[in-house]
Image (cartoon, rainbow, N blue to C red):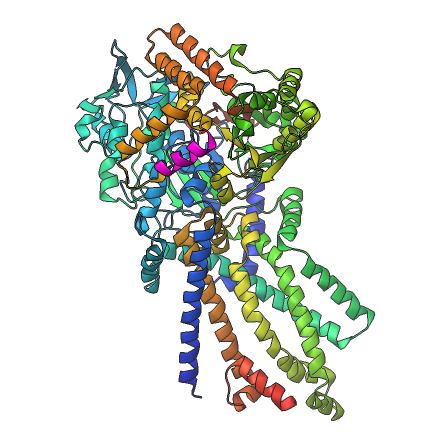
């Protein structure tokens, strides 16, 4: 094992030598070439200065080196990778996720009460929670932030917050959707209220299990609104940004690097061990590119996919660095609409769903496990009662019954996907073997994919689109949010109704209220009876006050949804990371942000 | 034709070409499937990407150039800004104007390209001369064979080989990123090979041609030392055609290092251009496309001017334009 210090210094020496070679050609422009070096040290030497002086021989430098895809912005209210960096510890919400990501623990709120009817959450904020400029974090900060979130097209950063506020369905905050859609313009209609400096009240539309978990989403983080209003364009730049998380931005060189240091006004400094977090911002990486920087000791934690995993697993030393968060996402096939009604037949879809050899597909996918439900196994209370098992005999019987014995005369199935995936090929392969039908991967560019997956295809094109989903592992998200009863109803619409449905969706002349009413009417009249029943079940589940009763309702709903086979689960995916053994206190959760910076420290090498 | 009116003509032609480029780019973008918001939704990797809830996003992004207005008006709004070098904010980098992205990304691409071409020249000229002076010898064939291999080897493959050598085997260079001079070495090395091959071949053939010129033969016949004749007279003149290649070569490297920039994850302009196309980021794509067109045309203009300056015959013929002079020359030859 290389030490943390030596390889970097050696690299730098070589770099200086080679740098000298180019010095002549670099001249003046070189200073600006690696970003605005407005502050202290240059990124290349920042870490080494400290490393050169090993005064505390026992305590290694508390510098964490990470890499990230380039962050254009970190506004947590806009859907980019930046929001997931923000939630790791630059900002902190009312609540945080617990160790395994299944429940919440106190964040800025030290405690909270829920009214007996389950409609009003009262958060009590810590007295010692502070912004990085020394201001206290107040309830009003949250109210003002959420007003920004629910105001369509606010701010000059990111063309409005519209990216993130459409994910607020899960919070079910009273009046938020109406405010967002412009049905009401009166902020007092929205159930967010700062009662006093340290008390925030949030009212939900109806009892909302999973409400607290949904408050851990980055879009619910507080912003320092005075700064945001003063610098609507540049509030996130290093020289302006004010944040309330354990870390704050010290330096942010566009397209190059971001350095974080502890926020001195954070309330829980005992849990902040790192002196500095250096994030290299890298452009559009490909899978397979992760292991090289890690092996070259450039980063301490790195996410792994596909070939990276195989490489790490077959490496005698690095195999011990692999850390796995189970059940982070799932892979599904969603039915494509077609003029050919073949897949509008539930039995046919069932035959295809049962005919996939999931063990085989999982075997060829490094981070995959067989997925037999659209509810991840990590959801508390999950059991096998809602899974759909592979059953080749039943699948063959269904096909024969539908007039396709041994798959004879069955049209070719297309699997529409945005990237070449080994699991897609494995599905194709297993259908061929199990059912005797032919299928093929239709790999298209992402622009083509987004258009084709909602289109009504012509007579000779039937199939599914391939996708994956990661969400909070709880029942309301997995059953109520994706795939929601409304999603399922939309998928169950006959092709010609779906065409009409999309026209209504795109009709700019209709007001939001009119449009929603017309869409609801179309679903009411044409969606499958099962999908309508599903909506009732989910409603009952959401209203239920007894947790056991609630879980039972959700399971019933999930079972009903899965039996429709409009969305077919294929794999559950784990999230793989390579983590240096010296990194302590890292807690990997299945959530998209993967971990918090808080609590991480660096131990001496053995 | 006076120099001023020649320049005026060239500049008018450049402006017309830019308008044509903008119209073609915009039209193609309109025809391309998908839009920024939808693509962002599936590629941002964020959780909870449900089926619904995209309409507001689409509107939000379009609103900057006018929500629900016809495409041709969006185009005019964009071009109005572009005329004053204000392309507006990018969709993907909403806090930054496209011209700022260009101002930051282009020096990176240009520096890499300049250094790569400079190194290529330093290598290519001796190689080309060496091969020309030993025409048809095994040394000539051998050199040209290796050089041809170099042309055939794409720079991204060279890049991967460099990573294997310098990062994985010796661990002396960082694999990717952009935070110091050490990040420049491999990208430049990866880029050097191709231009070296192209230039060496040019130098060789140009040198061969010059060596057959009467003044070279005469100089040698008069007892001039071969080395002096070659370096003083032949080399100088045989480098003139290289200038013709150099301009477009430099321009294409400055704008077309996409693969190398992607491989080494360098925030150069080529990468932004490619990303803009892939994500249908209209202002960024239009801005970079126009900028690239401008660079290419400026390079050609410079080459033409330099060409006229370097070759007195062209000046004597009264034309500054390369194609014009060449036409004249070929007519004379006929």
Q: Position of residue B69 (x, y in %)?
A: 31, 51
Main SS, magenta residues: helix
At which x and y percent is residue A192?
Answer: 23, 24
Q: Residue furthest right?
A: B138
Residue visible at 51% across and 46% down in the picture: B177
Please determine whether, in this image, residue A100 is positioned above or below residue B243. above
Q: Relative to residue B147, is residue A402 drawn left or right?
A: left
Q: Residue at x 51, y 60 (%)?
A: B255
Q: Along the horizontal axis of the image, is A258 left or right of A128?
A: right
**Is residue A419 magenta-colored?**
no
Quarter of the image where one finds residue B145: bottom right
Q: Position of residue A286 (x, y in %)?
A: 56, 41
Name, please, the residue furthest toward the bottom. B222
Q: Total of numbered circles in the picture? A: 0
Residue occupying image coordinates x 42% and y 79%: B9
Tell me what residue is drawn at x 67 percent, y 77 percent: B206
Q: Is residue A137 visible?
A: no
Q: Is residue A411 left or right of residue A85?
A: right
State the residue in front, A256 or A96.
A96
- Residue A414, by quadrant, is top right
**Span of residues in magenta:** A494-505
Q: Nearer the viewer, residue B150 or A537?
A: A537
Q: Position of residue A172 (x, y in %)?
A: 31, 22
Q: Can residue A287 be seen in the rendering of this structure?
A: yes
Q: Is residue B1 above or below residue B271?
A: below
Kindly give the residue lying farthest to the front in the view shown: A403
- As rendered, which of B59 and A224 lies closer to the eye? B59
Quarter that holds the C terminus of chain A:
top right
Quadrant of the rendering where the N terminus of chain A is positioned: top right
- Residue A504 falls within the magenta-colored stretch: yes
């Amino acid at each position: 094992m290389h030490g943390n210090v030596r390889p970097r210094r050696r690299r730098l020496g070589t770099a200086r030598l080679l740098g000298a070679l180019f010095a002549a050609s670099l001249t003046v422009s070189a200073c600006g070439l690696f970003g605005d070096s407005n502050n202290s040290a240059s990124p290349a030497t920042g870490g080494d200065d400290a490393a050169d002086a090993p005064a505390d021989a026992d305590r290694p430098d508390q510098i964490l080196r990470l890499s990230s895809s380039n962050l254009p912005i970190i506004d947590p209210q806009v859907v980019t990778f930046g929001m997931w960096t923000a939630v790791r510890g630059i900002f902190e919400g009312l609540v945080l996720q617990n160790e395994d990501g299944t429940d919440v623990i106190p964040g800025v709120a030290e405690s909270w009460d829920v009214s007996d009817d389950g409609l009003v959450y009262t958060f009590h904020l810590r007295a010692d929670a502070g912004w990085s400029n020394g201001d206290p974090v107040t309830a009003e900060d949250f109210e003002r932030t959420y007003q920004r979130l629910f105001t369509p097209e606010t701010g000059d950063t990111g063309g409005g917050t519209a990216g993130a506020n459409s994910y607020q369905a899960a919070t079910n905050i009273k009046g938020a959707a109406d405010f967002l859609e412009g049905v009401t313009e009166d902020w007092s209609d929205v159930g967010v209220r700062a009662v006093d400096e340290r008390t925030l009240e949030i009212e939900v539309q109806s009892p909302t299990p999973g409400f607290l978990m949904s408050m851990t989403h980055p879009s619910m983080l507080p912003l320092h609104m005075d700064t945001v209003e003063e610098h609507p364009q540049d509030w996130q730049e290093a020289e302006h940004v004010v944040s309330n998380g354990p870390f704050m931005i010290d330096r942010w060189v566009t397209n190059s690097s971001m350095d974080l240091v502890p926020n001195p006004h954070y309330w829980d400094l005992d849990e902040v061990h790192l002196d500095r977090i250096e994030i290299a911002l890298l452009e559009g990486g490909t899978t397979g590119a992760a292991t090289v920087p890690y092996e070259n000791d450039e980063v301490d934690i790195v996410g792994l996919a596909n070939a990276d995993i195989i490489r790490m697993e077959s490496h005698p030393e690095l195999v011990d660095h692999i850390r796995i968060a189970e059940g982070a996402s799932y892979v599904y096939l969603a039915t494509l609409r077609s003029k050919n009604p073949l897949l509008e037949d539930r039995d046919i879809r069932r035959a295809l769903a049962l005919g996939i050899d999931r063990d085989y597909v999982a075997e060829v996918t490094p981070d995959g496990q067989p997925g037999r439900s659209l509810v991840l196994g990590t959801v508390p209370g999950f059991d096998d009662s809602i899974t759909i098992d592979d059953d080749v005999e039943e699948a063959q019987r269904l096909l024969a019954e539908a007039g396709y014995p041994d798959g004879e005369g069955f049209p070719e199935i297309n699997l529409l996907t945005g990237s070449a995936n080994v699991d897609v090929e494995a599905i194709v392969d297993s259908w061929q073997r199990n059912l005797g039908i032919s299928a093929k991967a239709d790999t298209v560019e992402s622009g083509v994919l987004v258009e084709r997956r909602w289109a009504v295809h012509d007579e000779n094109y039937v199939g599914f689109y391939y996708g994956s989903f990661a969400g909070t592992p709880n029942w309301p998200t997995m059953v109520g949010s994706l795939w929601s009863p409304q999603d399922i109803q939309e998928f169950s619409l006959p092709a010609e109704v779906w065409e009409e449905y999309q026209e209504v969706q795109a009709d700019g002349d209709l007001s939001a209220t009119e449009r929603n009413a017309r869409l609801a009417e179309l679903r009411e009249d044409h969606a499958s009876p099962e999908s309508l029943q599903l909506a009732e079940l989910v409603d009952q589940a959401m209203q239920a006050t007894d947790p056991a009763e609630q879980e039972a309702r959700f399971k019933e709903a999930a079972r009903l949804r899965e039996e429709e086979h409009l969305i077919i689960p294929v794999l559950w995916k784990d999230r793989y990371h390579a983590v240096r053994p010296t990194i302590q206190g890292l807690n990997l959760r299945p959530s998209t942000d993967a971990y918090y910076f808080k609590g991480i420290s660096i131990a001496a090498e053995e | 034709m006076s120099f001023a009116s020649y320049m005026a003509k060239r500049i008018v032609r450049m402006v017309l070409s830019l308008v044509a480029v903008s119209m073609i780019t915009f039209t193609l973008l309109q025809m391309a499937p998908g839009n920024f918001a939808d693509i962002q939704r599936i590629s941002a990797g964020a959780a909870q990407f449900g089926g619904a809830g995209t309409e507001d996003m689409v509107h939000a992004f379009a609103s900057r150039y006018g929500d629900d207005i016809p495409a041709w008006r969006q185009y005019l709004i964009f071009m109005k800004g572009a005329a004053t070098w204000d392309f507006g904010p990018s969709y993907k980098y909403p806090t930054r104007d496209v011209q700022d992205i260009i101002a930051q990304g282009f020096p990176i691409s240009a520096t890499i390209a300049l250094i790569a071409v400079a190194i290529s020249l330093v290598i290519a000229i001796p190689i080309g001369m060496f091969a020309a002076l030993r025409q048809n010898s095994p040394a000539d064939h051998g050199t040209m064979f290796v050089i041809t291999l170099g042309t055939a080897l794409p720079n991204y493959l060279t890049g991967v080989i460099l990573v294997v050598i310098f990062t994985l085997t010796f661990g002396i260079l960082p694999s990717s990123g952009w935070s110091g001079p050490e990040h420049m070495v491999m990208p430049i090395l990866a880029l050097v090979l191709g231009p070296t091959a192209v230039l060496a071949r040019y130098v060789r053939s140009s040198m061969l041609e010059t060596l057959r010129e009467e003044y070279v033969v005469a100089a040698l016949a008069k007892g001039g030392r071969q080395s002096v004749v070659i370096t003083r007279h032949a080399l100088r003149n045989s480098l003139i055609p290289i200038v013709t290649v150099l301009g477009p070569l430099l321009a294409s490297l400055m704008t077309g290092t996409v693969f190398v920039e992607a491989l080494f994850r360098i925030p150069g302009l080529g990468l932004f251009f490619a990303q803009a196309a892939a994500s249908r980021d209209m202002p960024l794509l239009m801005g970079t496309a126009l900028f690239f067109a401008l660079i290419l045309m400026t390079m050609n203009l410079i080459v033409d001017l330099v060409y006229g300056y370097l070759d007195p015959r062209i000046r004597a013929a009264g034309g500054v334009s390369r194609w014009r002079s060449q036409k004249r020359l070929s007519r004379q030859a006929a």
